[in-house]
Amino acid sequence: MGAQLNPPGSLTELRDRLSSQVDTILRRSAELGFLGSMPIPDQIDHALGFVFAAESEIHGPPGSVLDLGTGGGIPGLVLLSCWPDCRVVLLDVSERRTSFLTEQTAGWRRNGPLEVVRDRAENVGRDERFRQHFDVVVSRSFGAPAVTAECAAPLLYPGGALIVSEPPDGTASERWPSDGLARLGLMASVQARFDGRFSYQVLVKAGPTPDAYPRRVGVPAKRPLF
């Protein structure tokens, strides 16, 4: 844990993989109030940290990724651009945000399939089209650690990775206790630091997720596992 995954030149190299569509769509998203107050260039850099952490963990681009609570398209649109051959699912419960993303990505040319899904994560985790179908799940600000873990774990293939944006001074053992993670088949891997500014917790699917998870809508937040 605490590994520094940030080789020289990595941010510049990742920026070169971005389509001009990313900045254009995110500016529209910001105008509609779908993004936070962080400047868009910084939000893009933060999203690139997910790309770096994922490729470091699985040694290359994933074949499939789901953005848990994609909101206005961060980090999902950046993943879409950096991984053109990857199956990408952008998941959010908001009708306005998902309608916006569906419209804005309709003409995006890529090799891998793209889906914008409007639903609750608890429902998606029990859907055969999505359960255990992803190499990587990412979460920027979906919820508390226990909620994120419970909703993400059922979506991952064995050996897949959950990557969560973390506070820079977060303590992994407190936020991601091993006993709680083990109930979901997860295990903490590295804490990735990107560009000296952004932190991410990487968790791997080390075992099966019991059929009981995720619990029904709202229960993970009301009765967190840890």
Image: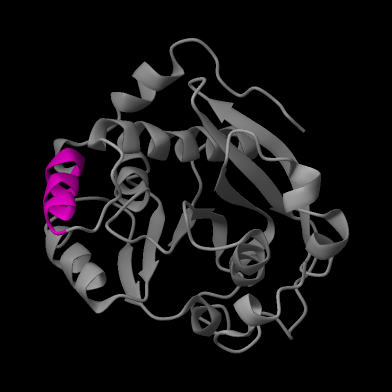
For image coordinates 55% across by 15% down, the residue present is: 7
For the view shown, which residue lies furthest in the bottom direction? 216
- Residue toward you, 154 or 141: 141
Query: Is 145 colored magenta in this rendering?
Result: no
The magenta segment: 22-32
Left or right side of 202 for 78: left
Looking at the image, which residue is at 66% across and 70% down? 150
Q: Main secondary structure of the magenta part?
A: helix
**Residue 91 in the image, given as x and y percentages of width and height:** 39, 68
Q: Quadrant of residue 132?
A: bottom right
The image quarter containing residue 206 is: bottom right
Q: Is residue 210 above or below residue 157?
A: below
Q: Is residue 66 above or below residue 208?
A: above
Q: Is residue 10 left or right of residue 13?
A: right
Q: Residue at x 78, y 79 (%)?
A: 210
Residue 57 image point, x, y percent: 64, 37
Total numbered labels placed on residues in the image: 0
Q: Going by the image, does 135 lie left or right of 38?
A: right
Q: Residue furthest top?
A: 8
Percent from the top left, x then y, of residue 164? 57, 49
